[in-house]
Amino acid sequence: MTDSGLATPVLHPGVSASKRRVPLYVYVLSIGLALQFMSGEASNFGFPIAPDRFLLPLGIVLFLIHPDRSRRTWKIQPIHLLLFAAAMWCLASMIWFGTIQSAEVRFGYWDSYGVMPFLLFAIVPVIYETTERRKILLIAMTFLGAYLGLIAAFQGLRLEFLIFPRYIVDPQSVIFGRAFGPSLQVGSNGLQLFACMVCAAILSAQVAGLSRWASRGVAFLCAAGLFFTMTRSLWLGGIAGILVALWLDRRTRKMALALVVIVPIAITAALVLDQTLQEMIVARLNDAQSAYDRINASETALRILQFRPFFGVGYYNFWNVENDWFWQLDTTPVAATGIAVHNVFLGNAVELGIPGVTLWLLGLLGAAKGLLRPLPRIPEQLLWRHSSLGYFVCWFTAAMLMPITYPLPSS
């Protein structure tokens, strides 16, 4: 979901300095959000449970018992009711089709569909209501971006001996050589890199000296990491998101035009100088089989919708039933079945039915509407607005071309 903190209230000038101190729950939630990149792989970092599993709920509890909560009245809005209805429909689908018995499905419902993103959307207007609080989140995400960007660069440049933890280095993986990061998922890693790039860019506008240059360096490193994912949907989404964010601000429109010229030249130079990189990119661009698999999955999903438009086949259940509904098309060969629909909107429709995906879409549109709300001409708020719109464009592009079944990009 998009960040609703763009329209956040700010403390009144008369509030004492002591009340402006950043409370503990802001640190806990910010660190928890950044550490979501470990979800599913926490044991490889030496944790018995993913840190975000307890840090995010702990942060919410600390917020609820903090005086901040008692100083404000909570007003239920239509968007909150939509998100609640969407969550309840999905829960009912899990119970009705029996997928709730799977821990993976429960985590997917909590993380990526999901309960936690909905909760965060409802409370971030208070949690990150001041510049100082938002800066804590930016710093946490910038540190994450430095780590993910370095790992992506090491993977793309084949410097595997520098990668830590070592589980990330897996020559047997079918996507070895691409930047799939600690999550072992190219799509997840790419969207996390874009989110960290956005945060590092915002932070660079709020700090000075060495910190500014370091933040800019992290943003550049994350952008390079997107390239090393060797994923066409992320390339399209990343380029579109960056250009949208730059074009919205008059001061950076010339930079957007410059990137249109500079980026192709830089990529061409890299391909000329690195034969291995050239071979990888050519292979990815000529890889038609993965496109055929996605077409087959989408055709199967549309076929199911014709017969089960109301309830679908159950949340997180498409790959279990795809083979029962699959018909081979005359024009597309078959290599793999039992995969997720590579379109978030169609995937939710076939699993939750038309009513379920409608509730989810209305909630998404209600959340995104905040990005178009009129704002005072305050530089920081405009920067957040433009950056968030850029991320939304990247997320939307990726969501049209691949599944998104991981937490951080949805939060």
Image: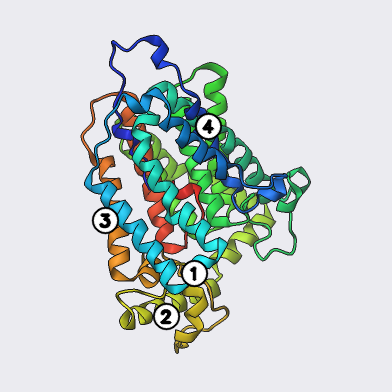
For marks 1 and 4, the one nearer the N-term is 4
Residue ID for mark 3:
362
Q: Return the x and y of residue 80 as percentages of the image width and height.
A: 28, 47
* Amino acid, disc 1: Thr
* Amino acid, disc 2: Thr
Residue ID for mark 4:
28
Between the residue at mark 2 and the residue at mark 4, the CA separation in whole angstroms equals 43 Å
Between the residue at mark 1 and the residue at mark 4, the CA separation in whole angstroms equals 32 Å
Residue ID for mark 2:
300
Residue ID for mark 1:
99
> What residue do we see at 57% from left, 26% from top?
214
Between the residue at mark 2 and the residue at mark 3, the CA separation in whole angstroms equals 25 Å
Q: Left or right: where does residue 229 sit relative to residue 69?
A: right
Element carrying mark 3:
helix
Kindly report which numbered mark, 2 or 3, lies closer to the viewer in this rendering: 3
Q: Left or right: where does residue 195 sit relative to residue 228?
A: left
> What residue do we see at 30% from left, 46% from top?
367
For marks 1 and 2, the one nearer the N-term is 1
For marks 2 and 3, the one nearer the N-term is 2
Between the residue at mark 1 and the residue at mark 2, the CA separation in whole angstroms equals 20 Å
Element carrying mark 2:
helix
* Amino acid, disc 4: Val
